[in-house]
Amino acid sequence: MLKPDNTPSLDQDINRREVPALKTHLMVLGQDGEALFPAGVADMDFKAPQPVLDALQKRLDHGVFGYETVPDGLMPALINWLHIRHNWTVNKSHILRAPNVLNILAIAASLFTDEGDGVIVQPPVFFDFYDILHENNRRMISNPLILNDGRYTMDFDGLETLASDVRTKMIFLCNPHNPVGRVWTKSELQKLGDICARHGVLVVSDEIHGDITFSGHKYTPFSSLGAAYSNNAITCLSPAKSFNIAACCSAFTVISNDARRTAFQVENSRLTVNKNNAFASVAMEAAYSAGAPWLNDVLIYLEENLLSVRNCVKDIPGVELIDPDGTFLLWLDFRGLGLAPDDLTAFLRTKAGWAVTRGQAFGREGEGFARLNIACTKAKLAKALAQLEKAVENR
C-alpha cells in the first residue's frame, strides 16, 4: 500500500517476524506468544522515512564499508533540527557521540558520582534506569510522581528534601516521561532545575522521546532553559524513537560545561565507544534533514490511535487511560479490576491476548498498571481493543 507520493502508508501491515525484532521475539513474547498483540517494546511498526531508506540504499550501493569519519552534514542536520523543531540553539562543540542513550546515562553515573552515592529517579519510570544504578553500585533515591485526578505531577517538596542530602549527587530525568506520557512544562523543568542547582545535584536528562508530542503540548529541552540550567545538565538525544531507526542509529549527548564535557570525551576514548558506523550516520543525517514530513504524518496517526483508545477505554469498567501529553506509549490503569500485579499480567496475556509491559517493571508505583505501545496500524489496535473489551466483559 502506497501513498500518492509513493511512500509506504502507515496502515501497511508489516510482518515484524521476518527479522529478529525484539518485540515479536520469543524472549519477549515467550514460546506460546506468537498470537499475542505485541505492544511491549518501545518501537514503531511503521517503515522508516523514505529519505532514510533511500540514503541507506545509496550507501549500500557504494559497496565499500571501510573505516569512516562522521559525515560533514550530520552535526549541522542535528543542530538545525533542534533549532527549527525545538527552538534550541546548540553549540556544535558541546555535542558528543555515544552508542545509545543508556550508554550516556551509565557513563554519567560512573563519572560524576561515586559508589554508594544517591541518584534520584521519579517512578514509575523507565526500568533501565534501575538496572544502570544497580550495576554501577549507586543508590537509587525514589522521588515518586504524584497521580491526582488522572494526571501525574512531580513531588517538588519531596525532591527538595532528597536533593538536600549531601550524599545525593544526580537525578535521572525522563523528559518526556516514559511511561506516564508527561511532557514536562517549562515551569516544571525550571523548578526542578532550581532545586537541583541549589543542592549541587547534576541533572542527566533522557530526552529520547522529545520529538513525539501531541497537540497542545510542547517539549522543552532541559538545557534550552538557559546557561544556568545547561551548565548543570547532561542531555541525552537520539533519533531512535522519532524515526523508528533504533537498530541503525546511535545517540548524542549535549554537555555545555567544559570540565564535564572533557571528562566525557576522555571516558569515551578510554572505552573506545567513539567510533563510527556508516549506516547509522547515513540514517541519522537523512532523518534529521528530510524526515520531518514523515514524522508529522506519524504524529497525526498516533493522535488518531490515541483517540481510539480513549473512546474504547471510557466504556470499559475498571480500566482508565492516563491521558498522555506525548510519546507513543500509553499508561493504562487496571487497578479497578482488583487483580494482583501478576494476575493482571496473566489476565491481559491469556484473556485479552495482550503482550504489554507490566506496570511493576517501572517500580512498585506501577503495580496495577500496564504500558501499551500504540505505534501500530489502526486495524491491529482496533482488534486488540476489542479483545480487551471482551475479556473484561467476560470476567
Image (cartoon, rainbow, N blue to C red):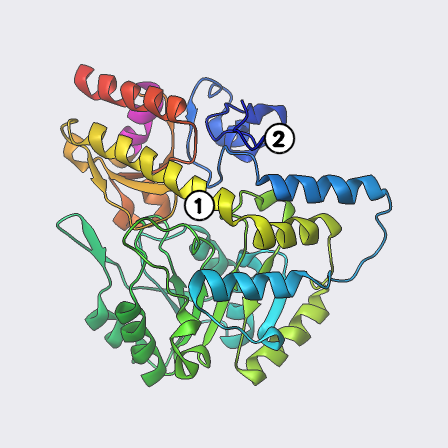
Q: Is residue 58 above or below residue 95?
A: above
Q: Which of the numbered marks, if any, corresponds to residue 20?
A: 2
Identify the residue at the far front of this view: 4
The percent position of residue 378, horizontal first and vertical second, equals 38, 26
Q: Marks 1/2: CA distance?
A: 28 Å
Question: In the rendered image, is residue 103 in sight?
Answer: yes
Who's the residue at 29% across and 78% down the image? 195
Look at discs 1 and 2 and give the one toward the viewer.
1
Q: Viewed as shown, does residue 311 lie left or right of 229?
A: left
The image quarter in which residue 106 lies? bottom right
In magenta stretch: residue 248:
no
Query: How many numbered marks appear?
Result: 2
Q: Viewed as shown, does residue 64 lie left or right of 59?
A: right
Label 2, residues with CA under 10 Å away: few <14, some 14-19, many ≥20: few
Label 1, residues with CA under 10 Å away: few <14, some 14-19, many ≥20: few
Q: Between 140 and 228, which is closer to the camera in this rendering?
A: 228
User: Which secondary structure class fits the magenta region best?
Assistant: helix
Who's the residue at 36% across and 82% down the image? 197
Q: Secondary structure at mark 1?
A: helix
Q: Amino acid at mark 2?
A: Pro
Dot 1 and dot 2 residues touching (CB under 8 Å): no
Q: Amino acid at mark 1?
A: Asn
Q: Secondary structure at mark 2?
A: loop
The percent position of residue 208, horizontal first and vertical second, equals 47, 55
Q: Which residues are magenta?
A: 342-351
Question: In the rendered image, is residue 162 in sight?
Answer: no
- Which residue is identified by label 1? 296
Q: Between 19 and 187, which is closer to the camera in this rendering?
A: 187
The percent position of residue 64, horizontal first and vertical second, equals 87, 46
The image quarter in which residue 107 lies? bottom right
Who's the residue at 64% across and 65% down the image? 75
